[in-house]
């Protein structure tokens, strides 16, 4: 009798563990934070080499396909729970037989097999859950839509949108060690590169770069115990850099005699750090301490650079 009670207790514990696991899996995955408290987004890389509306339609189609895949998984999300309860039903048949004086584990074994199948199916459905798209994905759509009418007829945008991650090993620009021999990696992530030949003959180039710092993990000896302990990685902050370059069409434009931009001026979330108009080319660099900069601030910097042009008299 004690063996049956012990076995029944273990069975109930296993059943509860599987139940709460399947219940958690049946719920939609909540976006988790990364190693440094930042939200994880879907890794996306898009090459820009087409007309504006073709690029926008492709981006919309990609997002729709991802959402359709996730929606298809949602239809089956609660099926593993139903399979789980079916397994409980089979196990109860053995309990009923035991009460009638017959010892059997055949139906319980079948119920256990159903539970294993439910767990496998639940894991497969959970993999259909997709990460959210980065806000930069929508920002690029707004930028392309705003600039679409300024593009020279028949020409295309050129560049890329890189949302695969700002702190990948391939994006380490340099590494440095401090006085305690701790290594800090400096990352450079050019997440947006855009070139466009405009309707008025000017050539526009835009580059958005995220610069991040991360101190690598290291071992440190404890002053009390004398043992070595592993210290985890530490995020040291990041900033956004924006570069705008306009090659002027000399037949139509010239740089204004009194530029309205100056070093240190704030344009939205950006602060101008470099500015020159030598050789008929406007070069403007700006930086921002914010982790994310919305598309309107990028467009404001582009507009500020373009406002330096004066149309030549006919």
Image: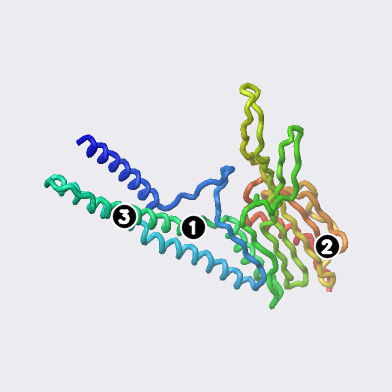
The colour style of the image is rainbow
Sequence-first tag of 3 and 1: 3
Q: Residues within 10 Å of mark 1 (few under 14, many from 20)?
A: some
- The mark closer to the camera, 2 or 1, is 1
Residue 146 occupies which quadrant of the picture? bottom right
Residue at the image point whose x is 59% and y is 60% from the top: 44
- Measured as percent of width and height from the top left, residue 138 is found at 58, 60
Numbered badge on residue 281: 2
Q: CA distance from mark 3 to mark 1?
A: 29 Å
Q: Nearer the viewer, residue 50 or 230?
A: 230
Sequence-first tag of 2 and 1: 1
Contact between marks 2 and 1 (CB within 8 A): the answer is no
- Measured as percent of width and height from the top left, residue 131 is found at 51, 55
Q: Quadrant of the N terminus?
A: top left
Q: Residue furthest top?
A: 224
Q: CA distance from mark 3 to mark 2?
A: 71 Å
Q: Nearer the viewer, residue 215 or 132?
A: 215
- Measured as percent of width and height from the top left, residue 27 is found at 39, 51
Sequence-first tag of 3 and 2: 3
Q: Nearer the viewer, residue 270 or 312?
A: 270
Mark 1, residue position: 130
Q: CA distance from mark 2 to mark 1?
A: 44 Å
Numbered badge on residue 113: 3
Residue 220 occupies which quadrant of the picture? top right
**The residue tagged with tag 2: helix, strand or loop?**
strand
Q: Residue furthest left?
A: 100
- The mark closer to the camera, 3 or 1, is 3
Residue at the image point whose x is 69% and y is 56% from the top: 190
- Measured as percent of width and height from the top left, residue 282 is found at 81, 60
């Amino acid at each position: 009798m004690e063996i049956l009670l012990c076995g029944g207790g273990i069975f109930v514990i296993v059943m509860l563990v599987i139940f709460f696991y399947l219940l958690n899996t049946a719920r939609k995955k909540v976006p988790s934070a990364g190693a440094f408290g930042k939200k994880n987004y879907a890794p996306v890389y898009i090459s820009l080499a087409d007309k504006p509306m073709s690029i926008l339609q492709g981006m919309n189609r990609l997002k729709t396909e991802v959402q359709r895949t996730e929606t298809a998984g949602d239809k089956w999300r609660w099926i593993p729970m139903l399979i789980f309860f079916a397994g409980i039903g089979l196990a109860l048949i053995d309990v009923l037989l035991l009460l009638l004086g017959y010892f059997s584990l055949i139906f319980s074994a079948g119920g256990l097999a159903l539970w294993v199948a439910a767990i496998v199916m639940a894991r497969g459905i959970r993999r259909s859950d997709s990460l959210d798209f980065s806000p930069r994905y929508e920002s690029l759509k707004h930028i392309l839509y705003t600039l679409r009418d300024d593009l020279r007829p028949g020409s295309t945008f050129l560049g890329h949108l890189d949302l695969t991650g700002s702190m990948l090993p391939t994006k380490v620009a340099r590494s440095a060690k401090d006085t305690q021999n701790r290594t800090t990696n400096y990352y450079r992530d050019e997440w947006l590169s855009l070139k466009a030949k405009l309707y008025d003959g000017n050539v526009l180039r835009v580059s958005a770069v995220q610069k991040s710092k991360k101190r690598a993990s290291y071992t440190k000896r404890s002053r009390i115990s004398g043992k070595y302990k592993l210290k985890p990685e530490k995020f040291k902050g990041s900033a956004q850099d924006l570069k705008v370059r306009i090659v002027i069409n000399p037949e139509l434009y010239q740089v204004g005699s009194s530029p309205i931009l100056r070093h240190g001026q704030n344009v939205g979330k950006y602060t101008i750090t470099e500015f020159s108009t030598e050789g008929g080319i406007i070069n403007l660099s700006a930086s921002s301490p914010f982790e994310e900069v919305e598309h309107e601030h990028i467009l404001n910097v582009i507009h500020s650079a373009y406002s330096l042009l004066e149309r030549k008299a006919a």
